[in-house]
Structures are given as C-alpha cells and as structure tokens.
Amino acid sequence: MKRNSGFLMRQVAGRFVLAPVGDTVKTFSGMITMNATGKFLWDLLEQEQTVDSLAQALVDTYEVEFDKAKEDVIKYLEPLLPIQAVVE
C-alpha cells in the first residue's frame, strides 16, 4: 500500500492535518488530524509498505512490541483506506 498523492499533510497549530487536494476534494471534503506518530507512518507510505513493514518501523523507532505496533497500524489505516488516502 502507498499514500495517495491526492492528499497533503501540513502542520497546523502543532498538529498534523491531512487534507485532500485537486480532484480528490470531489470525493472527500474533510480533514484528518494526526499526531507525530501518524505523520511518521504517513511519511513511510511515500514508498510501498505493508502492515508488517509499518509495524516494524514503529518497533524500531518507538521500542514497542510488534503485536501492539501492528494493532496500532491497523487502527491508523482504518479511516484512511475507505477515503483512499492510502491505496493498496
């Protein structure tokens, strides 16, 4: 999976905001806020990733258990996949 170029991440008032741009606004007109960990995962999604590779990156960076990291990645992707901010 990889992030959709129809969405941009910006930092606003200390939070990271994911917003649609261009034609993507026709299908999704909202915004999604993220913390620094969400931004970290978003940056990784510039390249093709799997749930496991994202979870491993969390393990390597934040020293969490793999199973917890994988659970967190799945929760992170839940709102992004239906709006196609991340595509498989």
Image: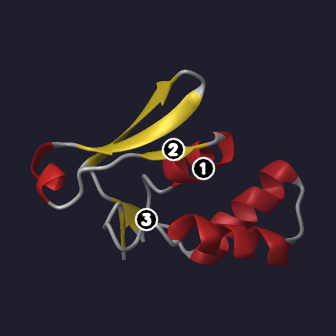
- Quarter of the picture holding the C terminus: bottom left
Residue at label 3? Answer: 80
**Measured from the top left, where is residue 30 in percent x and y?**
31, 49
The mark that comes first in sequence, 2 or 1, is 2
Q: Residue at x 83, y 50 (%)?
A: 62
* Mark 1 nearby-residue class (10 Å; few <14, some 14–19, many ≥20): some
The residue that mark 2 highlights is 33
Q: Position of residue 49 (x, y in %)?
A: 51, 68
Dot 2 crowding, Cα within 10 Å, few <14, some 14–19, many 20+: some
Q: CA distance from mark 2 to mark 3?
A: 11 Å
Q: Residue at x 64, y 68 (%)?
A: 73
Q: Is residue 39 above or below residue 4?
A: above
Residue 68, above or below 18: below
Kind of element beneath mark 3: loop
**Residue lying furthest top in this view?**
13
Secondary-structure class at tag 1: helix
Q: Amino acid at mark 1?
A: Gly
Which sits earlier in the primary sequence, circle 2 or circle 3? 2
Distance Cα–Cα, label 2 vs label 1: 9 Å
Q: Position of residue 27 (x, y in %)?
A: 17, 61
- Residue in front for this viewpoint, 5 or 33: 33
Tell me: 45 left or right of 25: right
Spot occupied by residue 29 in the image (x, y as percentages of width and height): 23, 50
Crowding near the residue tagged with mark 3, few <14, some 14–19, many ≥20 C-alpha atoms within 10 Å: some
Q: Earlier in the sequence, mark 1 or mark 3?
A: 1
Q: Which residue is mark 1?
A: 38
Q: Seen in the image, is 66 located left or right of residue 30?
A: right
